Amino acid sequence: MPAKAPTPKAADKPSREIARLLRDAINGGELSPGAKLPSERELAESHGVARNTAREAIRLLTQEGLVQPEHGRGVFVRVRPKLMRFGRRRYSRAMRQSGLSPFRAEVIAQGRTPDTECRSVTRISAPGEVAERLEIPAGTDVVRRENWYYADGEPMQVGTTYSPWAIVEGSPIADTKKMGHGSIYGRFEELGYPIAYVREEISARMPTHEEAAGLSLPDGVPVIDLWHTGMDDRRRPFEVTRFVMRADFTALDYDMPVED
């Protein structure tokens, strides 16, 4: 347990000073993932403050996603195992020959249990940001597939895939939720579009209300917003997927050649 706080700086509220000390203890490993924090009463006594001040310190840490209150049990340091996204390796031929989707292959390789849920398959007009990446006119018909991804039963990310109707018409991609052996990239390869190049644009932001609810995000946890474009061996874009991933449970691992 962290030592009693020194007298807070004039610019700092006592609650912020207590939160800082606890944060330092968490980041420094003194309070490890899964460890139980001192109670509000214990914090109040050890720091010489009122219980509502200690409560506010805990609220600040909860908002940052560092701790998680559990009703009737106390407040615990959040356990945050990272799920690695393997960058270009996730689309390699060896991965495709496994018959698994990139996500399933990654999760299994990390000793965890994957699950996916395709919630909808619809035909829509391409939004501008999708049409630009697919190099088609805005408003062109595309198939939109919404997939949710889980590891060990916890939601990790949502991926919304867009494919030109002219490419996927009549194939399982256009109207079937289950993609079968080789997943969606196996079906694209059957259509003459083997994945050979990828472009990924990555940023971070705070989630929408719907994203936070669907991904079970604690207060204060951002998301990784990743736009993926898949291209064939002639560099023709044939699918765009927007991934929204939990930033607390996701890590990105890329290796690539350096251009001359």
Image: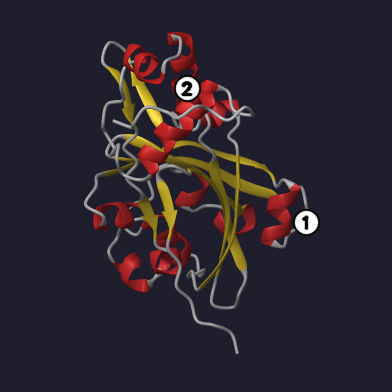
Give the crowd class for mark 1: few <14, some 14-19, many >=20 residues within 10 Å. Answer: some
Residue lying at 72% horizontally and 63% vertically, measured from the top left: 135
Q: Is residue 188 above or below residue 241?
A: below
- Residue sitting at the far left: 111
Image x and y of residue 255, in percent: 45, 73
Kindly identify which residue carries mark 1: 137
Residue lying at 42% horizontally and 15% vertically, measured from the top left: 48
Nearest to the observer: residue 57 or residue 259: 57
The nearer-to-camera label among 1 and 2 is: 2
Nearest to the observer: residue 13 or residue 255: 13
Residue lying at 58% horizontally and 30% vertically, measured from the top left: 9
Q: In this rendering, would 240 be left or right of 61?
A: right
Q: Check the picture and name the quadrant holding the C terminus.
A: bottom right
SS class of the residue under badge 2? helix
Question: Mark 1: which amino acid?
Answer: Pro
Question: Mark 2: which amino acid?
Answer: Ala
Image x and y of residue 106, in percent: 32, 56
Q: In this rendering, would 177 be left or right of 79?
A: right
Kindly identify which residue carries mark 2: 57
Q: CA distance from mark 1 to mark 2?
A: 52 Å
Give the crowd class for mark 2: few <14, some 14-19, many >=20 residues within 10 Å. Answer: many
- Mark with earlier residue (1, 2): 2
Q: Which corner quadrant of the image does residue 92 belong to? A: bottom left
Q: Which corner quadrant of the image does residue 73 belong to? A: top left
Nearest to the observer: residue 49 or residue 77: 49
Nearest to the observer: residue 91 or residue 200: 200
